[in-house]
Amino acid sequence: MTRFPQSRFATRRSLAAARSLTVAGTIAATAALTGPAIAQPVDALEPTIAAHGGWNAWNEQRTLTYDAIDWPLGVQPEFSHTADLRSRYHRAESATYTSGIAGGEAWLAPAPGIEAGTDPLGLPPAFFLHGNFYFHAMPFVFADPGVNVRPLGPGELFGETYDRLGVSFGAGVGDTNDDDYILFVDPDTRRLAAINFSITHDAVRGDAAIADAPRKVLVFNAWQDVDGLLLPETLTFHAVEGGEVASDGATYRITNVGLSTEAPDPSIFVDPGETDEG
């Protein structure tokens, strides 16, 4: 059993997409909270939250589950994920590993038959667990405590004009609270259409100033209705070079999405190595 300190998040489809959307680059941008989280009404964000099912419906939920198909980040293209929406504990399983996090320490257990010493995930576990969840719980995670949302006015993406919202994070929120997001909102439906986000993690930004941190774009191609809440169904990552968004990207699907008002069994998030030792 391998344990990892808490971290955060990353891509492929064509070789060009793989070079543009680096593993550390994409996932380092997720400013996921790691403690109890209850959505709070935010005036600028409220129409978008309402368009995706509303505050009350989301806040009633305790468990989110889903499968990712053709996942372009890391080495495993398919996995299943379970999240406790209040504690932000996570568990992911694939054909080659099981991984989880409960509190500040993540663990990774290779599946039987996987050679010892290999890395079946291809990413730091906490980085992966918090990060992929953050994308798949949008737009609701932008209402987490410590997240600041403000109107930015209209802006264009891929030839279409959207209303934009700016997102920043309070001190100590998430692993990289200097990240910022620009949300592109459909002016007719008020649904989230895309996000443009900075990557301020030291491993990606290096010696560059925060203002010069690299950026990526994630487009929400389709949404699915899950118990009255609209959650992502197909998404595409795009590289940003010199301020220009690449037209080609890496697309994947989220399937078998489930919500429950019951909390998951907390034991599923615990390192099985600790259980064996006990």
Image (cartoon, rainbow, N blue to C red):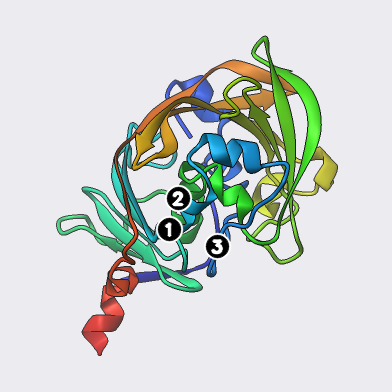
Q: Which of 277 and 68 is in front in this view?
A: 68
Residue at x 67%, y 38% (from the top left corner): 197
Name the amino acid, label 1. Glu
Name the amino acid, label 3. Ile
Marks 2 and 3 sit apart, C-alpha to C-alpha, by: 12 Å
Locate residue 212, reporting x and y percent: 81, 39
Look at the image and tell me whether residue 267 can be seen.
yes
**Which-is-in-front pick, marks 1 and 3?**
1
Which element carries disc 1, helix, strand or loop? Answer: loop
**Which-is-in-front pick, marks 2 and 3?**
2
Quarter of the rendering containing residue 156? top right
Give the crowd class for mark 2: few <14, some 14-19, many >=20 residues within 10 Å: some
Name the amino acid, label 2. Ala
Q: Residue at label 1?
A: 60
Mark carried by residue 134: none
Q: Residue at label 2?
A: 57
Tell me if label 1 and label 3 are in contact, CB under 8 Å: no
Residue at x 69%, y 50% (from the top left corner): 42
Residue 3 appears left or right of 94: right
Residue at x 47%, y 51% (from the top left corner): 58
The quadrant of the rendering that contains the N terminus is bottom left
Task: Give the mark nearer the N terminus: 1 vs 3.
Answer: 3
Tell me if label 1 and label 2 are in contact, CB under 8 Å: yes
The quadrant of the rendering that contains the C terminus is bottom left
Quarter of the rendering containing residue 247? top right
Locate residue 210, reporting x and y percent: 81, 47
Q: Nearer the viewer, residue 186 or 237?
A: 186
Residue 106 appears left or right of 99: right
Which element carries disc 3, helix, strand or loop? Answer: loop
Residue at x 46%, y 43% (from the top left corner): 136
Residue 210 appears left or right of 81: right
